[in-house]
Amino acid sequence: MRQVNKSARLRVSATLIVALFLMGMPVSSSAVKSPEYKAALSQMRVVKDTFKGITWYHDKSTPKYRNANAFELYFGTQKGANTTLRLVIQYYGEDWLFIEKYLFNVDGYTYEIDPSYGDIEKDSDSKVWEWFDTKPNKGEVDLIKRIIKSKKAVMRIEGSQYYKDVTITSTQKKALGRVLIVYAGLGGK
């Protein structure tokens, strides 16, 4: 019986921290000690760049390489510097899209991310890679928070000639949320 009560308290605590964070309220440093933060941190793939002194945090559910479709957040920490949040949108497929922008339908509301010319990288072999890796602005972070809380979110990867619609999965939403929790816990704003 005691185990059930402890589990219930942990769920309530974790839910409260996530709700405060998603509403844009600051999470205290005590959040770092919370079970929710520890659980989110345990789901991170941590990569250390010893040459640059940066430690990168990616959710374990996200692809390691560019040869996969993805919608993800990751971030880096460095001694004496603020953490750096990054947004990645990757397309991997048979056909070139020549991506120009990304449209999002989140529970019936439409949003847009419009990268500057040259911000979308491209590569190919027998398949095509097109990806966008950027430091998200406040509006884009707000969009990501809406996506995490959404019932349904669909991203349209719109190119000059073609487009591809992709539903953002519950796995992706959970990964986005975990990265934001660890990011906030390590001092990101």
Image: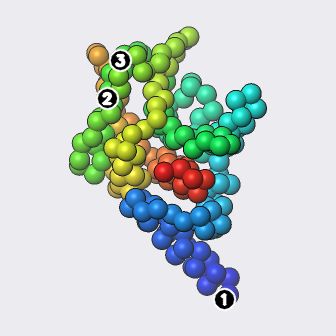
Q: Residue furthest front?
A: 80
Question: Does the image show residue 109?
Answer: yes
Q: Position of residue 146 (x, y in %)?
A: 35, 52
Q: Nearer the viewer, residue 184 or 16?
A: 184
Are there few (<14), some (14-19), or many (20+) residues within 10 Å of tag 1?
Answer: few
Residue drawn at the location 58% of the way across and 57% of the way down: 185
Q: Position of residue 154 (x, y in %)?
A: 34, 41
User: Considering the numbered disc 2 on the image, is that residue within a helix, a strand or a loop?
Assistant: loop
Q: Work out how far the residue at label 2 is from the one at label 3, CA to CA, in angstroms.
A: 9 Å
- Mark found first going from the N terminus, 1 or 2: 1
Amino acid residing under circle 3: Tyr
Residue drawn at the location 56% of the way across and 25% of the way down: 66
Q: Residue furthest top?
A: 125
Amino acid residing under circle 2: Asp
Residue drawn at the location 68% of the way across and 54% of the way down: 42
Q: Which residue, given by chain and number where applicable, does mark 3 sit on?
A: 117
Q: Quadrant of the N terminus?
A: bottom right
Residue drawn at the location 57% of the way across and 44% of the way down: 82
The mark found on residue 114 in the picture is 2
* Image colouring: rainbow
Q: Which residue, given by chain and number where applicable, does mark 1 sit on?
A: 1
